[in-house]
Amino acid sequence: MIRQMSGAEIAFNLKDEKGDVVPVEIDGIEEEVCERTPTPEKKVSIQQRVLKARNSEQQMSIIAASRENRKQEWVELLDEHAQIVNEVNCLEGVGDKENINGPSDGAAQIS
């Protein structure tokens, strides 16, 4: 194994699948050190951050109010649905009783 430390360059020999010696060099360290993490081009002032936070809070309150309205509408729709189901069940119950007892026009009771 051979190591050469010229700057950030490392070289050594490895054997491949056939047993032949293959030189390998690693020199990516310099490149990694030179690369900088991108920094924001534009700094945001405290005032802009406060305004953004206020706008976000306003948006959240609008969304919360909308959610409450939709929730109330949903409750009303469920109540209306329950009333309709109840009416249908009552009508079906009356229809079933008519079929069992015969016509309910009163003709059968008059003699």
Image (cartoon, rainbow, N blue to C red):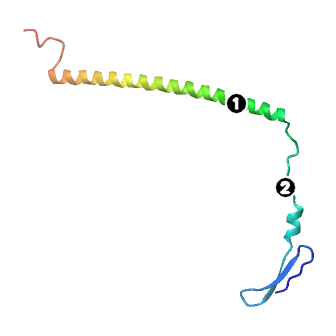
Considering only vertical position in the picture, is 3 above or below 77? below
- Looking at the picture, which amino acid does disc 1 mark? Glu
Whether 75 is drawn above or below 24: the answer is above
Residue at the far right: name it: 6
Secondary structure, mark 1, is: helix
Residue topped by disc 2: 37
Whether residue 7 is situated above or below residue 1 in the rendered picture: above
Q: Quadrant of the C terminus?
A: top left
First-in-chain label (2 vs 1)? 2
- Does 97 appear above or below 35? above
Q: Residue at coordinates 42% horizontally, 23% vertically from top-left?
A: 79
Measuring from the top left, give residue 22's x and y in whole percent. 80, 85
Mark 1 sits on what residue? 57
Query: Residue placed farthest to the front in the image?
Result: 46
- What whole-number distance in Å separates the C-alpha atoms at marks 2 and 1? 32 Å
Residue 11 spot, x, y in % from top left:
85, 80
Crowd class of label 2 (few under 14; some 14 to 19; many from 20; radius 10 Å): few
Between residue 99 and residue 56, name the one nearer to us. Answer: 56
Q: Secondary structure at mark 2?
A: loop
Taking the image as shown, residue 71 lies to the left or right of residue 8, namely left
Question: What residue appears at the point 27 percent right and 24 percent down from the top-left corner?
Answer: 92
